[in-house]
Amino acid sequence: MANSNNKKVAVTAGLRGASWRPERMLEPFSSTPCPLLTEDGQGALGVLFSRGGERKVVFIMHPRELVVTHYLVPDVLDAGWACWVQGARSIGNDLRLEHEFALYDVAAGMRRLREMGFETIVQLGNSGGAGLFAFYNQQALCAPQQRITHTPAGRATRFDSADLVPADGIALVSPHPGQGVLLMNALDPSVDDEADPFSTQAELDPFSEANGFRLPPDSSRYSASFIERYRAAQRRRVARIDAYARHLVEQRQAARQRLKSGGSRADKALASHGPIFQVWRTDADLRCWDTSLDPSDRYVGSLWGSDPFISNLGSVGFGRTVTPESWLSTWSGLSSNASMARCAGAIEQPTLLIEYTGDNCVFPADADAIYEAIPATRKERYRARGNHHGQALDEGEVSGQLIAGEHLGRWLQDTF
């Protein structure tokens, strides 16, 4: 239901909002850090929370963050389960994040949990963790010879020989459609020149009053024709960046081939170069500024706040600095393998989906599409009022995090 109060704006739902409240962890518990070595020789870190004697465990992971103090850890422990929270190999550094290799990180955690004697493992994907676990699950359930052989940039995955232990259940909390689709939906397509962050095609400018924009806290109102042109232009911009990324990869590979037959100093330099580029203006999802689109309880604004000029042009934002490989694998809505649209259809285990009704990152139609794509015969879906991290939308309200935790705890106990 649309929020009738259009004079309130979204507040930034940063990492702090994803943490538990200290009073929720007053019962005795142990936390054990566990270094991991992946099959491809990289390091990662997991932390096991336990009250002792558990044989069932919830595995929480995000591809870009180590959410050790995730707000659902207390609920997992209260349900009588242990909780494993893990980081990927390059925590906080999504510059080089390739989702294919993050699957090796997930696999290392899954093997460690089996080695510890856990009989039941449920993967809990929160936000971007949903796409990561859906991708892992898809590949884990594939016959080895049918798994993805190369990343979108052409690097061999070697999944055919990887030990990918499947999970027994999957929980999805505020799951967005995947990092790439999320970015494509938020990409500002009015950018006319990727080398100039200020270049703008006026007819596609989402923050022009002529196109329907209104300054928050007022909601913008975009016409159907503008929305159609805008979304088509977003796909064109992604395709343009994809082509540039592939050009950089092919240029380097060609230089490496030339080196095999001698080559030159210039070839050596080009073959060794690891290009990095910036992607500006990535906070322009029309649904954030026009709350009549796919209406919900959300307030005007995005995950980054209510000032689109700061979030769209500032230094902090999704996919702001990338390599060709990380762009194609993680941030491209056209090329990434780690999208819910591509992977949700492989989820056959018991599944829980929890969405927040005031989310400025996951919209009702997104959650509908994800849930409908999951073929599991045992699946449940719940809604709780809150923002992307389940924080209360209004002062005095019960936190959506608590409601989500109650649903999770009951589902764990009843299902397993």
Image (spheres, grey):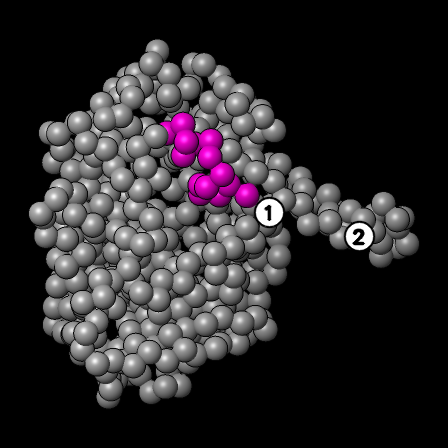
Q: Residues within 10 Å of mark 2 (few under 14, many from 20)?
A: few
Please name whichever residue, 207 or 145, is drawn nearer the observer in this view of the structure.
Answer: 207
Find out whether residue 320 is within the magenta segment.
Answer: yes
Position of the N terminus by quadrant: top left
Q: What residue type is labelled 2?
A: Gln
**Residue at position x 62%, y 36% from top?**
244
**Residue at position x 49%, y 29% from top?**
236
Q: Is residue 297 visible?
A: yes
> Is residue 66 toward the left or the right of residue 169 in the image?
right
> Is residue 136 toward the left or the right of residue 240 in the image?
left
> Quarter-wise, where is residue 308 in the image?
top left
> Quarter-wise, where is residue 156 in the image?
bottom right
> Is residue 175 toward the left or the right of residue 296 in the image?
right
Residue 133 spot, x, y in % from top left:
37, 61
**Residue at position x 84%, y 54% from top?**
259
Q: Residue 49 carries which label?
A: none
Q: How far apart are marks 2 and 1 (CA)?
A: 21 Å
* Magenta span of residues: 308-321
Q: Is residue 415 visible?
A: no
Position of the C terminus by quadrant: bottom left
Q: Which mark is residue 257?
A: 2
In what element is the residue under mark 1? Answer: loop
Residue 394 spot, x, y in % from top left:
13, 42
Q: What residue type is labelled 1?
A: Thr
**Residue, disc 1:** 323
Residue 262 spot, x, y in % from top left:
90, 54
Name which of mark 2 and mark 1 comes first in the sequence: 2
Residue positioned most to the top: 210
